[in-house]
Amino acid sequence: MKITVNGEATEVSADTLPAVLDELGYGEAKVATAVNEAFVPAAARGEVTLSPGDRLEIVAPRQGG
Amino acid sequence: MATFYGTEVASRLMLGTAQYPSPAILADAFRRSGAGIATVSVRRESGGERAGAAFWDLVKELGVRVLPNTAGCHSVREAVTTAQMARELFDTPWIKLEVIGHADTLQPDPFGLVEAARILTDEGFQVFPYTTEDVVLADRLLEAGCEVLMPWGAPIGTGLGLTNIYGLRTLRAQFPDVPMVVDAGLGLPSQAAMAMEMGYDAVLLNTAVAKAGDPAAMAEGFARAVEAGRLAFEADPMEPRDMAAPSTPVIGKAFLE
């Protein structure tokens, strides 16, 4: 199915959030996630099933002022 | 010692981690600054990139507390979600709350700021709001649960210093017991010293150090200025006066006419 990952249209075959993260190469990366603008805590990712058109944001620590 | 949400911090200088020429120079600048708090952010990461982990390792080596920000957020929803993601990544309830209302000045959106501060406080965050020197807004932020205020000196990244000295003095005087940090717009150590002389508890800066020709030297310059300004505040400065008053005793002067 086609979803939007960090603003880019992306084709994924998995549908649960942990499986999608694995498929996209995040593995054990230190990232936080939001689906359709709502935060999804790491502990709750297993309960989230993505649908076509969903917007997934994946962020990590960065420099800031 | 400055205290923010019950946490004592030895240094009154907070330093950002962005825009340094290299990670090594960033680390050197932090060492010379003596800063105890570093601001950080969250940004998009692509699969397999692992830039976040590398940056996080660098920050951990600095041995400072982190203050994640919601930089670049223009809506309450965006700021709240960003704060939630930051809390998970950095494992801290502290959040430097930015809700930007104007693209050219990066001026905070006062209405969104108060709303977001209330939501985040209710969720257990300890909010450091990036605000203006507006006393009414400050009052609303305190009502919303903020226990620290961070008024701007000038718009972010301008280096203009304290552009509204009257407003900053008034804000400081109105809420003498609230920890306050002048955040943003500083370009020179003298400006930081002035903020500290006015009784601000700390200053937060980034660009002035990161974009200096020698960031580490500038970091040390700011550290000394912050210390000097604080010492002066604690020493209870004299009142300025319009008329001259001789400092050398008049009595006993030789009569030579």
Image (tube, coloured by chain):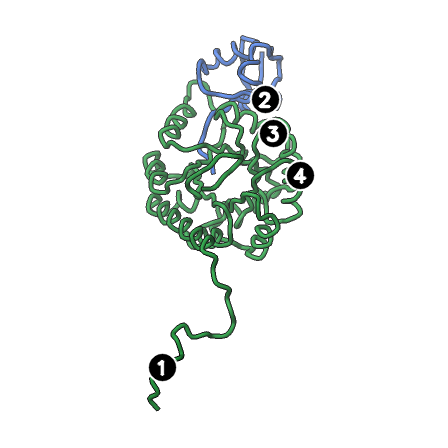
Chain colours: A blue, B green
Q: CA distance from mark 3 to mark 4?
A: 18 Å
Q: Which numbered disc covers residue B253?
A: 1
Q: Residues within 10 Å of mark 4 (few under 14, many from 20)?
A: few
Quarter of the rendering occupied by the N terminus of chain B: top left
Q: Residue at x 57, y 42 (%)?
A: B149
User: Callout 3, which amino acid?
Assistant: Val
Q: Which numbered disc covers residue B143?
A: 4
Q: CA distance from mark 1 to mark 4?
A: 60 Å
Between circles 1 and 2, the one closer to the viewer is 1
Q: Secondary structure at mark 1?
A: loop
Same-chain check, marks 1 and 2: no
N-term-proximal mark, 1 vs 4: 4
Q: Secondary structure at mark 3?
A: helix
Q: CA distance from mark 1 to mark 2?
A: 77 Å
Q: Secondary structure at mark 4?
A: helix
**Mark 2 sits on what residue?**
A39
Same-chain check, marks 3 and 1: yes
Q: Residue at x 66, y 39 (%)?
A: B143
**Mark 3 sits on what residue?**
B80
In front of the other: B135 or B27: B135
